[in-house]
Image (tube, coloured by chain):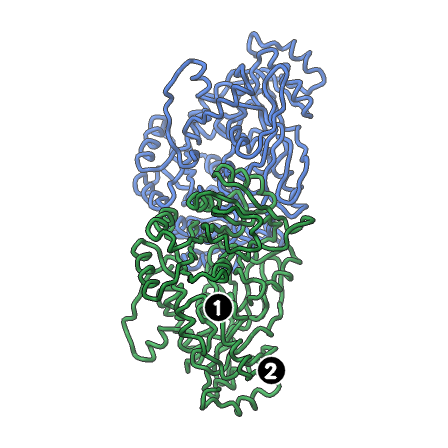
Chain colours: A blue, B green
């Protein structure tokens, strides 16, 4: 069923020639993302539905959709391929879902940089850049399906952030082209620092048409697993590896047993009861890497060179970040997850402390990244699910211990990773979406401003505040 | 004049067919390095002379020289091109200087690694690796003339250490081939961690025949200078740049005015009275770099792309590290220099403090590097020269302020950068040079062991101790 006053006829006529879907099954499928990772969000978001899904194939078509919706005062929620979390792509107030996955041209690639339309899959972008000897600096574990626009709008870090830091670090995002939500939509190019004001904002303050990313030299990677009897030893090795600047690697993640038990494709490789560190090591660093692992008491139980004959076709990148969570959820236990940020310098101490305090209520999964030039970890622990009250209590206790929470059980931009209000988000929304039609209900500061609220709570985050 | 009992006839006969020099002018020229940077060392080392200089062209010839010297009990001091400091290549007790600069084959280069004979010039090595799209991870400012063996034996860091850390970090030195100082010389290959036990040891515990280094992908670099009215602002920018992991750069150095005044080739570029930051920025990071410089209040006064038509032929790499010192010394003022290590996290505060405490007695020059995964700086300040007593007082005061001193006014391995005894140095020397003939008088622990001394002073260094 559509929202009673949804102007379907007017839109249909304005969108003549542009692919539209209004069958309930399509609308359901394209109104979802991986919010179901959270039992809390699942309950709140199941059933939220677009009135119409539009699938423009060109930027001209996007412009027509946006103009039509702006004129009709219809909410518009941009969407990549829905591989993100937190309901960032769920149309809370119905309206149109703008599926950008057909807008997928890689516009150009040159040494060090690539520019693509928002709907280009990261894996397709990679194919183009590799032809020139370059690869993406960081990728989400969903790189096969995820779009470049989706990653820009909903991602913050990725596999490779141990080298290049967070996506928002200067030099990673070179520019974006955005469209305003107006009857006469304007195209605006944001470069450098300004491009970060639309980043990780779920599309609330501009419709991203094109993204320009800086690249890294493409290297031959050997995917390695190091096994440890003790999780703290694994975490310490991951930290040391991260700080070993002479060993070139991409992605460093530590997984506490029994989390690896859910990694079925790796079951012949993994050791019962042992925790692991997964990483991609450059070929010319393999010897030094093995020596470092040995010195740390680890056993290199897997080293897969995808180019070698007989190599395994799986990639460890699909066991990192929230893919690990996905494997754990699929194992069927009543569990959910959190996203944690550890202060630099104290991270290993806090990792130990969490195991001591929570025992097996929390199974730890750490991803090591550079934050402000320094290696620390973010945590994506699997948490046994009782109910929301218990989960909130766990979160409070973690904060008291000194760990930052990037709450994955909320769809609010500010309440998730960012933690604090970015006034530029709001300023740009005011300029680009004066009627507040873009992905409504996701930017708390906007809604509070609309209600005339003041004194919004400000919490500082090491990850997001400069 | 030669040492009275030097067995010149026996050696001449054993070395038949190998190039030897015994004219005083040649012996003088090839018994020196840049120790004259230090007025203290200049007084102590002027006049120290080899009895004979031997210039083997092949490894077989090196082996014959070593065997002959070992049999005759003659001291042997290996030498690259003498571009190093501290008298590390000065034959304190006469004997033979083994000039390895003709042993200069680049043995192989492959993606990520290169192996060359000790006497290969770093600039020649670079030509070979660039053919494959790779470059050296770090270079001394003397890269044009310096040899790979000399850099390994006498260098610790270089232009590029902001990315790859110190040369001793695992993964940078992949291996070395060394020859023992024995009547029947043995060839030993040291890999990984073990190769570091012969590193920065001035050749006291093995004659280095071949060096294998890991490489970095070669990038198009734009050489940039950012000018600041205030030196502390320059230093803060250099730190921020170092920690900006999304901006790809190689080498970051900050130079306090009036140091830049001595950089004649740059005089049309530099601003009177201003301090500068010099760096090499990857082409695809230039836009973000300029934005960062602007935000820090700096003016980009120079950006030279060596590939562009009309580009300047000079390189800023020859104004970094001790080349800056060289320019300052050539300016003719009575000055000398120091080498400082700043603890991570407190470095900018200490940089400020030094200006406050010493005023214009010290002109600061900082090189930003990664140490244990974290950006800090080393200092190569220019210090006004009164006498040794005053210099020692300045050093004591700097140590009291919390700065580490890598004393460049001593030829002892342990008293310079390393600060503490490495027992492995001595163990390897015992195995590789049982008679103590290699570069004698440079390894304090060896001489004290020979004298039966115990309880050697141990001082910890953040840069050298694990």
Q: Position of residue B315 (x, y in %)?
A: 59, 55
**Residue under the point 65% across and 9% down:** A9
Residue projecting furthest to the left: B455
Residue projecting furthest to the right: A17
Apparent side of residue B432 relative to residue A33 in the rendered image (left or right): left
Judged from the image, the secondary structure of the residue bearing numbered disc 2 is: loop
The reply to whether residue A260 is visible in this rendering is no
Which is more foreground, mark 1 or mark 2? Answer: 1
**Frontmost residue, A294 versus B286:** B286
**Mark 1 vs 2: CB contact within 8 A:** no
Say whether disc 1 or disc 2 marks the residue closer to the N-terminus. Answer: 2
Q: Is residue A289 above or below residue B434?
A: above
Apparent side of residue A21 relative to residue B24 in the rendered image (left or right): right
Query: Label 1 to label 2, Cα distance in Å?
Result: 25 Å
**Frontmost residue, A337 versus B407:** B407
Q: Is residue A193 above or below residue B31?
A: above
Q: Chain of mark 1?
A: B
How many numbered circles are shown?
2
**Residue under the point 45% across and 64% down:** B193
Mark sitting on residue B19 = 2
Q: Is residue A341 above or below residue B460?
A: above
Q: Position of residue B242 (x, y in %)?
A: 47, 47
The reply to whether residue A430 is visible in this rendering is yes
Q: Position of residue B285 (x, y in %)?
A: 57, 43
Q: Position of residue B413 (x, y in %)?
A: 40, 69
The residue tagged 1 is: B34
Residue projecting furthest to the top: A5
**Which quadrant holds the C terminus of chain A?**
top left
């Amino acid at each position: 069923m559509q929202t009673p006053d949804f102007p379907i006829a007017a839109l249909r006529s304005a969108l003549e020639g542009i692919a539209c879907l209004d069958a309930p099954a399509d609308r359901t499928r394209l109104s979802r993302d991986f919010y179901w990772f959270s039992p809390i969000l699942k309950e709140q978001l199941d059933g939220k539905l677009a009135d119409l899904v539009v699938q423009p194939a060109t930027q001209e078509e996007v412009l027509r959709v946006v103009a039509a919706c702006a004129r009709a005062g219809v909410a518009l929620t941009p969407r990549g391929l829905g591989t993100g979390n937190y309901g960032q792509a769920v149309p809370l107030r119905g309206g149109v879902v703008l599926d950008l996955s057909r807008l997928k041209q890689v516009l150009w690639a040159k040494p060090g940089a690539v520019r693509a339309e928002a709907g280009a899959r990261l894996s397709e972008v990679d194919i183009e850049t590799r032809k020139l000897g370059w690869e993406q600096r960081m990728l989400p574990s969903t790189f096969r399906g995820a779009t470049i626009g989706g990653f820009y709008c909903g991602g913050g870090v990725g596999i490779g952030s141990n080298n290049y830091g967070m996506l928002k670090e200067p030099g990673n995002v070179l520019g974006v082209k955005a469209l305003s939500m107006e009857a006469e939509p304007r195209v605006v190019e944001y470069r450098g620092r300004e491009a970060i004001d639309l980043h990780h904002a779920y599309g609330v303050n501009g419709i991203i048409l094109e993204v320009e990313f800086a690249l890294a030299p493409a290297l031959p990677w050997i995917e390695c697993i190091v096994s440890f009897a003790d999780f703290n030893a694994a975490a310490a090795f991951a930290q040391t590896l991260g700080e070993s600047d002479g060993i070139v690697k991409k992605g460093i993640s530590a997984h506490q047993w029994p989390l690896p038990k859910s990694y079925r494709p790796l079951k012949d490789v993994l050791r019962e009861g042992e925790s692991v560190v997964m990483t991609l090591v450059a070929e010319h660093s393999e010897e030094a890497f093995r020596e470092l692992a040995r010195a740390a008491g680890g056993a290199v139980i897997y080293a897969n060179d995808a180019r070698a004959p007989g190599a395994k076709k799986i990639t460890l990148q699909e066991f990192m970040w929230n893919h690990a969570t996905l494997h754990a959820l699929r194992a069927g236990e009543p569990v959910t997850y959190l996203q944690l940020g550890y202060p630099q310098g104290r991270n290993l101490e806090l990792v130990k402390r969490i195991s001591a305090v929570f025992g097996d209520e929390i199974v730890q999964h750490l991803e090591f990244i550079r934050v402000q030039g320094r290696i620390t970890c973010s945590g994506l622990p699997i948490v046994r699910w009782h109910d929301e009250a218990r989960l909130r209590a766990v979160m409070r206790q973690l904060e008291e211990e000194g760990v930052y929470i990037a709450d994955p059980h909320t769809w609010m931009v500010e309440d998730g990773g960012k933690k604090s209000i970015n006034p530029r988000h709001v300023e740009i929304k005011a300029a680009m979406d004066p009627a507040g039609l873009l992905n409504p209900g996701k930017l708390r500061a906007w809604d509070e401003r609309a209600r005339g609220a003041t004194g919004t709570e400000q919490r500082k985050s090491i990850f997001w505040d400069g």
